[in-house]
Amino acid sequence: MTKAKGLLAMTLVVMAFLISCTARKDKTLEARNAEKPSSVERETQAVPAESPSDGVKRVTVEELQAALARGEALVLDVRNEAQYRAGHIAGAKWIPYTEVGERAPRLLPRDKLIVTYCS
């Protein structure tokens, strides 16, 4: 029973990340049409301009790099296969968002910060 509760909790956390990605998609498209930062600025942006109220923790690039260096994080790319093959963060694990609910409980570690990205 405890294992089932753990799997359910992990699935809920991953789904919260995915909901956040989906909810932000429209805002992201609007933002792209606004002023576009340089590639250096995009890669080093510290935090989103707004503070989302969805309960999903956001991390800065620096926080992610530090957690990865300590072996405390895993990057999960949830984009489709074509987007993943076109380019992805080095070392990222790929699970398309349509398969996360099914695959995440058996493939993702429970002892690490899971950082998802979708665009």
Image (cartoon, grey):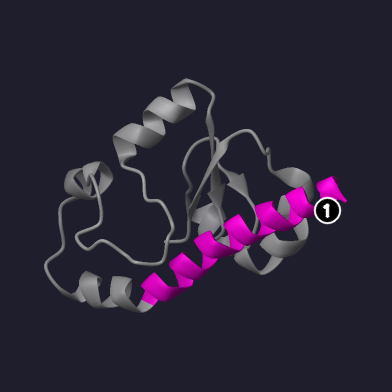
| Residue at the top extreme, as displayed | 70
- Residue at image point 14% right, 73% down: 34
Name which quarter of the figure residue 99 lies in. Answer: bottom right
59, 86: nearer the viewer? 59
Residue 37 visible in rendering: yes
Main SS, magenta residues: helix
Quadrant (top left/top right/bottom left/bottom right) for the C terminus:
bottom left
Residue 81 visible in rendering: no
- Magenta-highlighted residues: 1-25
Element assignment for label 1: helix
**Residue 85: % across, % down:** 56, 53
- Residue at image point 66% right, 69% down: 98
- Residue at image point 67% right, 39% down: 110
50, 29: nearer the viewer? 50
**Where is 79 relative to 106, above or below?**
below
**Where is 53 relative to 105, above or below?**
below
**Residue 103: % across, % down:** 76, 56
Q: Amino acid at mark 1?
A: Ala
**Residue 54: % across, % down:** 41, 66
Is residue 19 highlighted in magenta? yes
Report which residue position mark 1 lands on. Answer: 4
Name which quarter of the figure residue 56 lies in. Answer: bottom left
| Residue at the front extreme, as displayed | 1
Is residue 40 highlighted in magenta? no
- Residue at image point 83% right, 47% down: 2
Name which quarter of the figure residue 53 lies in. Answer: bottom left
Q: How many marks?
A: 1
- Crowding at label 1, few (<14), some or many (≥20) Cα neighbours within 10 Å? few
Is 86 on the left-hand or right-hand side of 43? Answer: right
| Residue at the left extreme, as displayed | 35
**Residue 71: % across, % down:** 54, 24
101, 38: nearer the viewer? 101
